[in-house]
Image (cartoon, rainbow, N blue to C red):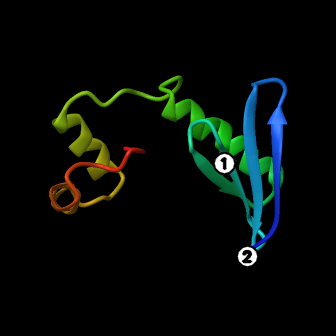
Amino acid sequence: MSTETSTNDDPQSGRTITLTQADDSWWVARDEETGVASQGETKQDALDNLDEAVALHKGEIGESIDTREEEEQVLEDLGIDTDEVSRARDEHEGLPDFM
């Protein structure tokens, strides 16, 4: 359940961003165009994290992963079981849109 929700058009970026305060008092920011969301303890933290998440989503920052081997190395570095990812990929016919 959310306790507060507001939608703001950001004149600098032209983006529509929805801010929602969750019951645990964390803020969730969602870019309506891309569907990308992030969170933070404050509104500003949520917006800053959203900026980074959208930039990653659009490929404006970060490194590209072009091969299965590169993907497996990144997952291993993050402590994620690559076999589990493979099983999930098989069960759900691919990866979610955000990956």
Percent position (x, y) of residue 62?
47, 29
Position of residue 75 relative to residue 70, above or below, is: below
Percent position (x, y) of residue 19?
77, 53
Which of pointers 1 and 2 lies earlier in the amino acid sequence? 2
| Quarter of the rendering occupied by the C terminus | top left
Percent position (x, y) of residue 78?
36, 53
Instruction: Residue at 17%, 37% (x, y): give it.
Output: 69
| Quarter of the rendering occupied by the N terminus | bottom right
The numbered mark at residue 63 is: none
Q: Secondary structure at mark 2?
A: loop
Front residue of this view, candidates 25 and 20: 20
Front residue of this view, candidates 72 and 50: 50
Front residue of this view, candidates 85 and 62: 85
Report which quarter residue 91 is drawn in.
bottom left
Q: Secondary structure at mark 1?
A: strand
1 or 2: mark nearer the eye: 1
Q: Are marks 1 and 2 in contact (CB under 8 Å)?
A: no
Labels in figure, total = 2
Instruction: Residue at 60%, 49% (x, y): give it.
Output: 37
Residue 46 placement, left or right of 86? right
Q: Amino acid at mark 2?
A: Asp
| Residue topped by disc 1 | 30
Percent position (x, y) of residue 43?
82, 53
Position of residue 81 relative to residue 9, above or below, is: below
Residue 36 placement, left or right of 73? right
Q: Residues within 10 Å of mark 1 (few under 14, many from 20)?
A: many
Q: Amino acid at mark 1?
A: Arg
Instruction: Residue at 73%, 51% (x, y): give it.
Output: 46
| Residue topped by disc 2 | 24
3D distance between C-alphas at marks 1 and 2: 17 Å
Residue 34 placement, left or right of 17? left
